[in-house]
Image: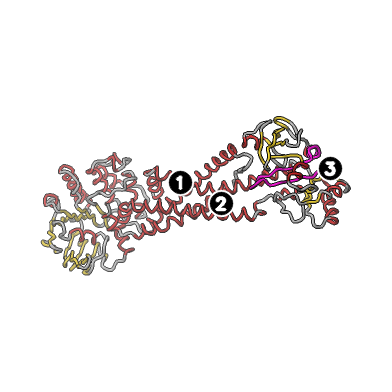
Amino acid sequence: MVYKLVYENLKHRPVRTLLSSLAIGLGVTMMLALVGVGEGMLEDQANRARGVGADLVVRAPGSSVVGMGSLSMNQKILDYVRARPHVTLATPIGIHSTGGVSSIMGINYDEFAAMSGGFRFREGRQFAAPDDVIIDDLYAREKKLKVGSVLHTMNRDWRVSGIFGSGKLARVMIPLTVLQELASANGKITMIYVKLDNPANTQAVIDAMKQDLPEYPIYAMEELIKQFSVNNLPELKAFIGVVVSLAVLFGFLVVFLAMYTAVLERTREIGILKALGAGPGYVLGILLRETVLLAVIGSLCGIAMSYGTRWLIATFIPASMIQAIVYSWWPIASLITLAGAVLGVLYPALKAARQDALDSLSYD
Amino acid sequence: MTIIEIENLRKTFRSGDVDVHALRGVNLMVQKGEFLAVVGRSGSGKSTLFHILGGLTPPTSGTIKIDGQSLTSLDEAGRTRLRRNSVGFVFQKYNLLPTLTVRDNIDIARDIAGRSEPWDATFLEVLELLGIAQKLDRKPRQLSGGEQQRVAIARAIVNQPAILLADEPTGNLDTENSNMVLDLLRHLNKKTGQTVLMITHDPEAAAFADRTVQMRDGELHGA
């Protein structure tokens, strides 16, 4: 019977129910979108790292395992790496940040193509001139670029010579020598990707290299890819914590306002229930159930809206951001929202439960 | 058998800096199955008596018993139990829950009382008598004032309370509907033996009762 009353109360004010649910859902969407972007971008980075086709990577001393890095490694290391047993191919990579999380990557085209199994060009072809740039299809879509278009970055204009299918480590690539020149970092590289004669030799090669290059982080690619996790990004974890707190606050405020208004509006009805013999627990139960139902509807709205944010991101900024749908966060976000909502209803519900029956019945 | 015993009942309100003596030593005995009308003008104290009898507010002093149970020492929880189990209310403004159907408005009173069994044959007869048996799935807004008051009567007696308290039950109704409601209250009283205590300012409404007492300046006359 109480559930029927709760359901009818929500149905009686459909606009308020809808708006409250959407507002509660926004908190859920905030959490799911943020976690989804974090996971999506890390997954994308991992996929693109896999796309290199290497067995191991040698990074500059002191560099972060999942960070972009800079042109800080001496290129002479490359000769040492190439001379190691089992190494069939080693190619240097240069990365230069162009602001935020965007970067431009310098490659030795032929070596990189050989290691990665070749570029699949949707349009155009590889670099033919020093001011040529190749970009992936997502970047081309986001920036509305075609072969022959001009791309302005690193304080100069580049001509797009080719657009390749994404999944090859970077979205924007230029010749490594040109990057080194522009960054005033001749002879410097960011990392070296290494292909072995047999992947089974990976650990043995790493162990041998670490003997000679103790300062250098050297990772098997599978090991590196496993590091692409939110747990290895303390800043992202902290940011998720902030957004979770905001979502709790959001749910609290929305429910507080909605239920406080509802309690005021239903003062007389609460008086009727009390006149019929309903105790404080009965009244409290009605409002708590109503809140839980609102939070459940809100969570469902929030989950649905997270598909909306994914569509928006994929449509308008496919190269800058990727949002994954992280199913494991659905119950987490819903429970967090429910906690905020229950906190929000406590004061209005206690106020209603303590309301004097006679005063409530006299309320117009 | 006496079902309501009131002795030297007093109620004093504090209004600003002034004490308002709403009841000044009320004495009243009501027998089980009696239909009693308490008549008085506005401000005479009859509604205060109604509220105390219904456990909506405590008395200041005096003794009051319903079906042997003393209300004087009851705390809020005790008064809540009294409203749940021993008293049925019919208000002037009907006081139905607008979001629920007729059936649910009646059922919520049973739910609050912790009863879940289906309506018995006697109650189904009462619904027929009240003329609402065919309107159980309607919402209050789809009913006339008279029909809403008849639903309120059904809700008030669904848990078979010791007393039915009706506060100006015809105050919002036209003559035709007033007579219908009063007839029904009288019929219920005679048919089921339900004790009814009706508060009214209307002598014509009071004429439907077995006995009438006058409330004047916080005192009962003719009790």
Q: Nearer the viewer, residue A259 or A221?
A: A221
Query: Looking at the picture, do discs 3 and 1 lie on one chain?
Result: yes
Q: Amino acid at mark 1?
A: Ser
**Vertical comparison of B10 with A216: above or below:** below
Question: Which residue in the structure is indicated by mark 1?
Answer: A21
- What whole-number distance in Å separates the C-alpha atoms at marks 3 and 1? 57 Å
The residue under the point 54% across, 48% down is: A30
Q: Quadrant of residue A124?
A: top right
Point out the tag, 3 or 1, that comes first from the N-terminus. Answer: 1
Question: Which residue in the structure is indicated by mark 3?
Answer: A89
Point out the tag, 1 or 2, that comes first from the N-terminus. Answer: 1
Helix, strand or loop status at disc 3: strand
Q: Amino acid at mark 3?
A: Leu
Helix, strand or loop status at disc 1: helix
Magenta-tinted stretch: A90-115
Label 3: chain? A
Question: Which label sits in the foreground, 1 or 2?
Answer: 1
Label 1: chain? A
